[in-house]
Amino acid sequence: MTMKLIHVAFRNISRNKRRSLLSGIAIAVASMSIVFLFAMVQGMRDDMAQNLATYYTGEVRIRNAQYEEYERYNPIHLTVDWQRIDQALAQRSDVTAYVPRITFPSAFYVNGGNHPAVGIGADFSLEAGYSDFASSVKEGRIPEAGKNEMLIGSVLARDLKLDIGDKVTIISSTAARGNNAMTLEIVGLAAFPVASLNSQFFWAPLDRVQHFLRMDNEVLEVLVMVEDDERKAAAAIKTDLESVLGSTLDIQAFNDISMMYSFIEIAQFIYYFIGVFFLLLGSTVIINTTMMVIYERMREIGTLAALGMHGKELTRLFFLEGVFISAIGAAVGVLIGAGITVYLGKFGLNFTDALSGIDMEISSVLYPRFNIWTTLIVYVYSVVISAAATLIPSRKASRIEPVEALRYV
Amino acid sequence: MIQVQNVIRNYKAGETVVKALKGVSLDIGDGEFLSIAGPSGSGKTTLLNLIGCIDALDGGEITIEGQPVSGMDKKTKTEFRRNNLGFIFQTYNLIPVLSAYENVSFVLSILNIPEKEIEERTMRILKEVGLEGMEHRRPDRLSGGQQQRIAIARALVKNPKIVLADEPTANLDSKTGEEILKLMKEMNRKYHTTFIFSTHDSMVMDYAARLVLLHDGQIVSDERR
Ligand SMILES: Nc1ncnc2c1ncn2[C@@H]1O[C@H](COP(=O)(O)OP(=O)(O)O)[C@@H](O)[C@H]1O
Ligand SMILES: [Mg+2]
């Protein structure tokens, strides 16, 4: 009997081709959008994690324990002891790479005016082993240690009409709470994936910045890349370093530091609900279609009932038809969604204009992240939800009185 | 085998009540070939639906094979139809997406009969109604008469005790109608199946072995010939 029902239900799909197509398309569009949306959010999340780890906080960040409390006063004197941290981290097998950094606010004295810019003092020989730093250099070269040179964000350079070879005087307050000025020559233009890095930042050799800011062998932070779970690693490093340096350090995983990253994590969670909502919206079409089909085949329902088919079997007949349409529609949608995702995952989506002026650690070109499991789950969800939706009108078929159905024209 | 006792059926149409059957009594024996005749609106369909267990009585009782119909719930009625009754409709009512063969075999699938037996019985009945070689055609590729033959095969394939046919020839030209009646009569003789069919066509009435005339929801004559 069930086989026969499946058989009839399957053939019924082609009876109202246009309507079946419409239902199928609605479900396809919904599941396609969901696959793409999920891939996009995942891509965004991965991108942000990558940027945070590379440029902002590392996977684990080591700072002075008091820094956060005084952060808004620019507490440049709250440093950490680079040498001892270096020694300790070198022993750890779960640490894959680490770099010292000094990020400090400053002003460029250019064309008779002051322009804010954020400086980053970095050890470029260590940076090479930490990330693919060299690939961000668009023109020129990386500054050399011991020289008064800088690498400047290309947008910042363009805004201030600066170019390679120009000399810029920068002004900043020092760790000794005085003011200091230094002149650096631009030796390279940088193009980072994150817009704000290009429009606000410049990079200079760590030793020159330490000298300029009156820090001996101190740095403001150490960015660490680790093997596995960042939170666990942060805790382990903390115990380790505290045994050497006492509790003078603030050591945190990137996902605990960045508010924006937590937002994305929450957003990803919310997107699951948005996905369900999309599907429900798509399902209204199949609900509607099934309803119409039931009215259209009223006499047939009466006939089948007269021949001895139970209400439950009639419900199943229409339900199965809905299941087939959903399964086909969702399959098509998921495949197209996956196709788009894979394509854009290769070539990227350019959000330069949309993201310009937005201070977020997100790249201007985003790559949706294809994941076979997410895609399969979306498929199953799509079929389950839209099939469940067809159950609503299908149940009507079992409540129809055969006499009335047979009289229906 | 079928006792119709003082049956009443009223329809509510808004404020007014239409008395479709006003106390109809009738005894139908095994293997009869009975026509319920009467003008349009006389209550033929209503009576057939009540005997066919697809409608509910407002009064009186119908007993089929000793089983009173009034006490049956929806599920029991469905079960009863499934096992004992065959239906033929004026508009054939075949499933358009199924072939002639599948339309007929479907009924046996509902009864969970083994596939091999289904095939045997379906092929045999299709041959008997004269559709050999057309088993795989869908209804839309067959004439009205051929479609009604499928319907007859569909009604008979499960060897029901009773076949109910509401104006089975009304949509056919008179020649084809006659052929259908001849076929029904032949099946009636061969399988001893009780046929109850309604009509308002005098040609059709001529084929009946017993003619019950309805008028305004009441039986006005009942003659055997
Ligand atoms: N569902 C219904 N609602 C209201 N009146 C009905 C309904 N079905 C039948 N009737 C009325 O009952 C009477 C008998 O109808 P019916 O049994 O269909 O007659 P016949 O089949 O002989 O033409 C008619 O007057 C018809 O209008
Ligand atoms: Mg009628």
Image: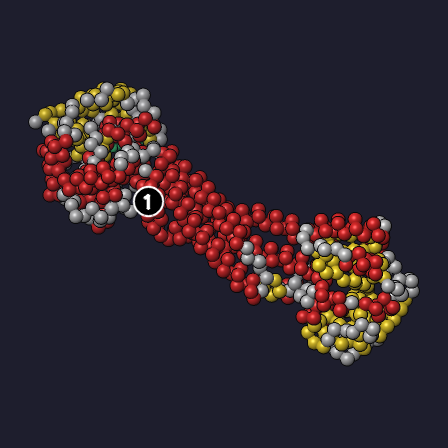
How far across and down, in percent of the image, does residue A264 sit? 65, 53
Residue B36 can be seen, yes or no = no
Splitting the image into 4 quarters, where does residue B127 fall?
A: top left
Residue placed furthest toward the left: B225
In the figure, A176 relative to A247: above or below? below
How far across and down, in percent of the image, does residue A203 sit? 77, 69
In the figure, A382 relative to A184: above or below? above
> Quick one: quadrant of the C terminus of chain B?
top left
Residue visible at 35% across and 37% down?
A: A314
Q: Secondary structure at mark 1?
A: helix
The residue lying toward the viewer, choosing from A56 and A309, is A56
In the figure, A290 relative to B108: above or below? below
Host chain of mark 1: A
How far across and down, in percent of the image, does residue B122 sit? 21, 40
Residue A272 can be seen, yes or no = yes
How far across and down, in percent of the image, does residue A230 sit? 70, 52
Q: Tell me the residue that label 1 is attached to.
A: A7
> Quick one: quadrant of the N terminus of chain B?
top left
The residue lying toward the viewer, choosing from B205 and A29, is A29
Left or right of B85? Residue A55 is right
Mark 1 within 8 Å of ligand 2, using the beta carbon: no
